[in-house]
Amino acid sequence: MKNKPVIIGVTGGSGSGKTSVTKAIYDVFQDQSIAIIEQDYYYKDQSDIPYEERLKTNYDHPLAFDNDLLIEHIGMLLERKAIDKPVYDYTVHTRSEKTIPVESKDVIIVEGILVLEDERLRNLMDIKLYVDTDSDLRIIRRMLRDINERGRTIDSVVDQYINVVRPMHNQFIEPTKRYADIIIPEGGQNHVAIDLMVTKIQTILEQKSIV
């Protein structure tokens, strides 16, 4: 299909730098039409579950995501239809009533910790990236983010990392590395890898324009 968008999956562990990679690519192509779909906007609606139970949500487990809706929305974007991207409210641990309108663009980046875990999602992607960063850097970045931006304590961040984030990473996220077309060490600091990705995307877009 001549006008079919390019779908790029960007994944990696929490704090790996996948958001930095996504932003670096976005900054290059924003004038050429690009959209970002964040997987963590697609956590399941839990409004039918008591608040006390929602507090126990494991956000690093594949079952936390509404991939059915995410796949439906990517399918609509591939057909050049607009979507209403959901918004998740972490203060009440369920989906907000708000949505964000997103128009279909030439390049669509699907970014999140488990975007390569679901075969149905992988099959929609033209390029699959895994941002591979050492665990010590990831925990430091996560700690700084959660303390400075989310008001968490050091003890709570460390406890969550040891009991939830690390085992989920080892069980579900790290194994998806084998599905990646390209592995990018050190995330947004790897300017060579990002430049190569940009060149690859430009080539695909040029090819689509002449098909």
Image (cartoon, helix red, strand yellow):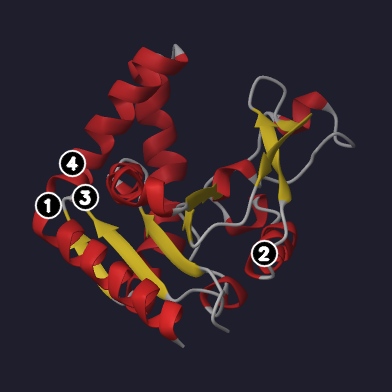
Along the line of sight, which residue is nearer the eye, 38 or 32?
32
| Numbered mark located on residue 191 in the image | 1
Among the two numbered marks 3 and 2 on one chain, the one whose residue lies closer to the N terminus: 2
Q: Position of residue 76 (x, y in %)?
A: 72, 64
What crowding class fits label 3: few (fewer than 14 Cα within 10 Å), some (14-19), or many (20 or more)?
A: many
Q: Which residue is mark 3?
A: 187
Q: Nearer the viewer, mark 3 or mark 1?
A: 1
**Residue 41 placement, left or right of 38:** right
Residue at position x 72%, y 51% from top?
Answer: 83
- Identify which amino acid the numbered label 1 is placed on: His
Q: Regarding mark 3 in the picture, which secondary structure is present there?
A: helix
How many marks on residues? 4
- Report how far apart the C-alphas of labels 3 and 2 lie in the structure: 30 Å
Picture residue at 73% right of the left edge, 46% below the top: 44
Quick check: marks 3 and 2 in contact, CB under 8 Å? no
In the figure, 109 relative to 176: above or below? Answer: above
Please tell me the numbered disc located at residue 136: 4
Furthest residue in direction right, as rendered? 48
SS at circle 2: loop
**Residue beneath label 2, please?**
80
- Disc 1 versus disc 2: nearer the observer: 2
Q: Please determine whether, in this image, residue 42 is positioned above or below residue 209.
A: above
Residue 138 higher or lower than 103, as above or below: above
Mark 4: which amino acid? Asp
Q: Could you give the CA–CA distance between mark 4 and mark 1, rounded to whole angstroms?
A: 21 Å
Distance CA(mark 1)–CA(mark 2): 31 Å
How much space separates mark 4 and mark 2, taking CA atoms?
Answer: 41 Å
Instruction: Give the residue type that dot 3 points to.
Output: Gly
**Looking at numbered disc 2 in the image, what kind of residue is underneath it?**
Arg
Q: Nearer the viewer, residue 132 or 69?
A: 69
